[in-house]
Image (spheres, rainbow, N blue to C red):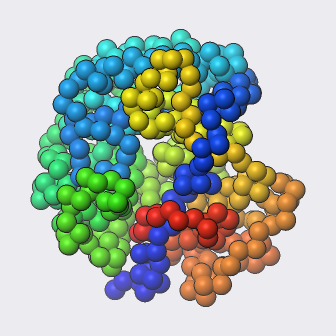
Amino acid sequence: MTDQILLKYAARRTPRYTSYPTAPQFGTDIDPVTYAQWLRALPAEKPVSLYLHVPFCKAMCWYCGCHTKATRRIEPVAAYAQTLLREIDLIADIVPARLKVSHVHWGGGSPSYLPGDELRRLMDRLRSRFDVLDTAEIAMEIDPRLLSDDFTAAMGETGFTRASFGVQTFDTDVQNAINRPQPFPVVAEATARIREAGIAGLNFDLLYGLPGQTEENCRRTAEQALSLSPDRFSVFGYAHVPHLKTHQRLIPEASLAGTQARLRQAEAMAAVLIGAGYAPIGFDHFAKPDDALTRAQAEGKLRRNFQGYTDDTATTLIGLGASSISELPQGYVQNIAATHEWDRQVNAGAVTAARGYRLIPEDRMRREIIARLMCHFEVDTGEIAARHGLAAPAPDLAELEADGVVSSYSGVVIVNPQYRTLVRHAAAAFDAHLPASTAVHSVSV
């Protein structure tokens, strides 16, 4: 029987809080001049993370919510890689010294669509312009269907330590309904290939709420995925936003599950993974007991950024590529999303900041409170406020407390373990920007 409290909140829309303030609050007052100033001011001694965005796929999956485009021609992808080389040089020339890098993440789109030699050149350039630490995690989001022998070899040669596969579902009918045919043997073969290349870390992304999904085929997908023994899982709910992503109009709304069915699908996947010994991390990740994410959560060091939950300790993230977002001590910056304009500006020798947000002291305090809730489900707001030299916020938690979602005393807020999937609602209570925002966020479950 579905918990009525879960049902009450599951369909309400809340931010995912991969940043605070969230991206809808970004404005055009953060321009290339400001971005360059912020980059120059980075402390030379502190390691940073790098994110590289490759906005190309061979075919468009109808559920996709990413900044990407489909092309069957490799020429635009190779040309993009050349501009990315120039952007690496451009940023490296602006920042102080040769910055240390503790984490590199490639996302998209499908970075695995890059030719292997382009990946080799890009990684060589990164290592020549930045001090990529020997202990750095180097990760990539991968479409298993595009993983060639040469590309896998390039990953192994250039020091990748983690691969994240977009699995989504193993149900053939659901795959056809989202234009992503991907038989289980393809994923199994890609898994073997990655491991043979010496890439030890493996993540699988799974989705629920897709057209035609049921509790049973979600459970079956999780069981099949387990047979390949990845280290981590991310289990996301499909966000149907055809007003933002027009290709999602190809998915009939009548084929989508309602709130109660989505809840059951999410619970079915979680039950399979937890039953197999994976630890729940945050509200939508799962990891093996000996995984670094599990240790980070146990030690109170788990963090959240634009890629989700992470054990990366760097507090500065530099985004490279069209639409990528940087998180700097002063605030957030997003590159221009249109690839042709990004290409033009980079080749003209300019950083491509299109919008962003300058943090004020209250934002920093609320960001820490929200991050603590999202990662550890408990926060002492008074202690954090005192460190920031500000008064503790006094959010309206009455409904959440009455429903048993949270409890609070003397400024300490605790999310009931039974309702950890609703943590976004507790976080939203501390979001000073949300009441005035017109942005449409995803449903909570």
Q: Residue at x 75, y 78 (%)?
A: 409
Q: Give the camera-side residue of 304 and 414.
A: 304
> How many tags in the picture?
0
Quick check: 44 above or below 369?
above
Q: Is residue 149 above or below residue 70?
A: above
> What residue do we see at 33% from left, 53% from top?
245
Residue placed at 65% from the left, 84% from the top?
A: 398
Residue 214 in sight:
no
Residue 286 screen position, x and y as percent: 43, 55
Instruction: Tell me residue 52's x, y (percent).
Output: 46, 31
Q: x%, y% of residue 339?
A: 39, 31
Observer able to see residue 400? yes
Expressed as whole percent of the image width and height from the top left, the position of residue 392 reads 80, 67
Q: Is residue 378 left or right of residue 288?
A: right
Q: Is residue 331 above or below residue 175?
A: above
**Quarter of the image where the N terminus is located:** bottom left
